[in-house]
Amino acid sequence: TTRGAMLAAGSLLALLLLAAALGARTAGVVCSLGEDGSSGSSSGICSSGVLQPLQSWGAQLDDSLPFVAGLLLCAALGLGGAAKVVWRLAPVLDRRQQKRLDEYSAVVVRVAQQAELLYEQYFLTLAHAEER
């Protein structure tokens, strides 16, 4: 259903935002280590300006990262759980499609019964042929 898909998309969005927040904080830490001279390989990336936006976001997230990460994780879990409930409980077929499916099921049951009767008759015929 549309509601279940929207809830699942919201859960995915919350997880992506959580990954972005953690990535921004990680970029800030990596670049701060590179500025101290303890890691020479990351200083090229940090000075090139590629990670500058992430560094600025990471600096703003220093104090609020646990709160933001917890909020996003709870939102992702809540939306994912709600999506699962909606997908389980919401009807997939409308009434007309359900009626057609029930009719097909009844036809399949009748065909299976007829096939069973034909097999029984066939085996009875074989049994009588062996008696002769």
Image (spheres, grey):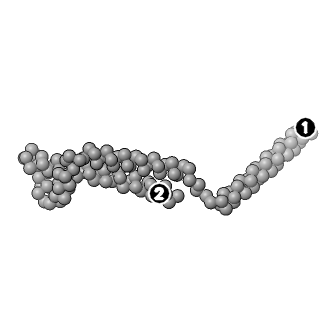
Q: Is residue 41 at all visible to an observer of this figure?
A: no
How far across and down, in percent of the image, does residue 90 sit?
A: 56, 53
Nearest the camera: 93 or 122?
93
x, y percent for residue 14: 35, 52
Is residue 61 in sight in this rendering? yes
Question: Which residue does the numbered mark 2 point to in the structure image?
Answer: 5
Q: Is residue 110 left or right of residue 15?
A: right
Foreground: disc 2 or disc 1: 2
Q: Would you call the spot at circle 2 few (<14 residues within 10 Å), some (14-19), or many (20 or more)?
A: some
Are discs 2 and 1 less than 8 Å apart at CB? no
Label 1 neighbour load within 10 Å: few <14, some 14-19, many 20+: few
Find the distance from the CA under tag 2 to the CA under tag 1: 65 Å
Residue depicted at x 38% and y 49%: 76
Task: List the residue tagged with mark 1.
Answer: 131
Residue projecting furthest to the bottom = 96
Q: Tag 1's secondary structure? A: helix
Residue 33 is situated, as x and y percent measured from the top left of the image, at 12, 46
The answer to whether residue 38 is left or right of residue 23 is left
Q: Is residue 28 left or right of residue 123?
A: left
For this rendering, which residue is in front, 37 or 69?
A: 69
Which residue corresponds to the image point at 14% horizontal and 50% vertical from the top-left?
A: 31
Residue 54: give x, y in percent of width and height: 20, 56
Task: Name the one closer to the observer, 126 or 83.
Answer: 83
Of the residues shown, which amino acid type is indicated by label 1? Glu
- The residue at the far left in this view is 37
Q: What residue do we see at 40% from left, 46% from top?
A: 77
